[in-house]
Image (cartoon, rainbow, N blue to C red):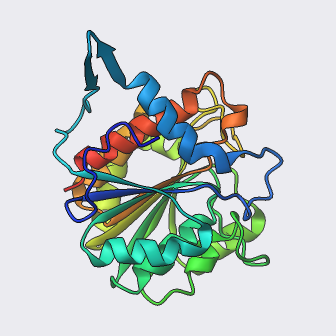
Amino acid sequence: MKFAWANTDSLDKADVVLVGVPDETGSYARRKSCSKAPDAIRKVSNEREVFERKGMKTVALSQICPMNKNIYDYGNISKGDVSKVVGKIVGEDKIPVTIGGDHSITAEVLKGIDKLREDISIVYIDSHPDFICSSKEYYGSVVCDIAEYKNIDFSSSIEIGIRAPEPEELVNVRRKYLKTISSIGVEAMGLKEVVEKVRDRVSDNVYVSLDMDVIDPAFAPGVSSPVPAGLTSNQLLYLMTEIAKLGIIGFDVMEVCPDYDMQDMTSHLAARIIIETISCVK
């Protein structure tokens, strides 16, 4: 089943390419099933965002920006093929949208982009910094893993929504001068100021990585590592779409855990975040 808003069967004609990576080999979470997320998100997008009556079928519109992108659903690929496939997409000046899977997949995505773009700024939206360096190549070491890439620029990168860091991560964040804004910081600062801080910090090549556990479990219970006191769904939607308007080279949505969801509400929210963000990409 394809993503409900996929509107072209031609990769050549696509502006945006959706890629699923049903893999959680990089996860140590007690909650499993994020490998099911790409298909769960596609399925719920068709069940709740497509309207059928009297032989007619329509797809719900985005609410923030006009839907004027050609979207191609590439289907699912293995984690080992991610950097190659994403590199091909970016090499053809298309925007990759990757659905995981666990967050370690982001390192593979950026490995493919790193060869083709310079001075890449990362906007990392997550409840955890994912900056463990004492272990490598898993969902908690993503930021440490990508620090070794040639074109990732931490001086122009930022983490948003952080609220459950480990002591080692705080040391690594300071060592790399990586700016962070906590979830309570977002609330205190206000969304417009957060977006301005992102705008002032990032380069022209911005990649956004979203872990759905940044959202409060009241809105997104079906994630691998839920943490209380998170962002609301509207706060996240505002941040994602406003950052997309700045111009981004790709984004991902990770860590939806369908087996722990309630009536597919997290998968549905992920689907809506994806299409709203795509619609606002410059």
Q: Which sits in the foreground, 57 or 184?
A: 57
Residue drawn at x 70%, y 40% as measured from the top left? 226
Q: Residue 260 in the image: x percent, y percent?
A: 72, 33
Image side of residue 99 versus residue 116, left or right: right
Residue drawn at x 48%, y 39% as measured from the top left? 42
Farthest residue, direction right: 30
Tell me which corner region of the image, top left, top right, bottom left or bottom right, holds residue 50: top left
Q: Which sits in the foreground, 82 or 109?
A: 82
Image side of residue 226 versus residue 237, left or right: right
Residue drawn at x 79%, y 78% as measured from the top left? 134
Q: Residue 46 in the image: x percent, y percent?
A: 42, 30
Tell me which corner region of the image, top left, top right, bottom left or bottom right, holds residue 169: bottom right
Q: Residue 216 in the image: x percent, y percent?
A: 60, 34
Tell me which corner region of the image, top left, top right, bottom left or bottom right, holds residue 207: bottom left
Above/below status of 276 relative to 200: above
Farthest residue, direction top: 54
Image side of residue 157 versus residue 178, left or right: left
Farthest residue, direction front: 55
Q: Is residue 155 visible?
A: no
Q: Residue 278 in the image: x percent, y percent?
A: 30, 48
- Name the quarter where the C terminus is drawn: bottom left
Q: Is residue 115 visible?
A: yes
Above/below status of 3 relative to 154: above
Q: Which sits in the foreground, 206 or 35?
A: 35
Image side of residue 3 versus residue 199, left or right: right
Q: How many marks?
A: 0
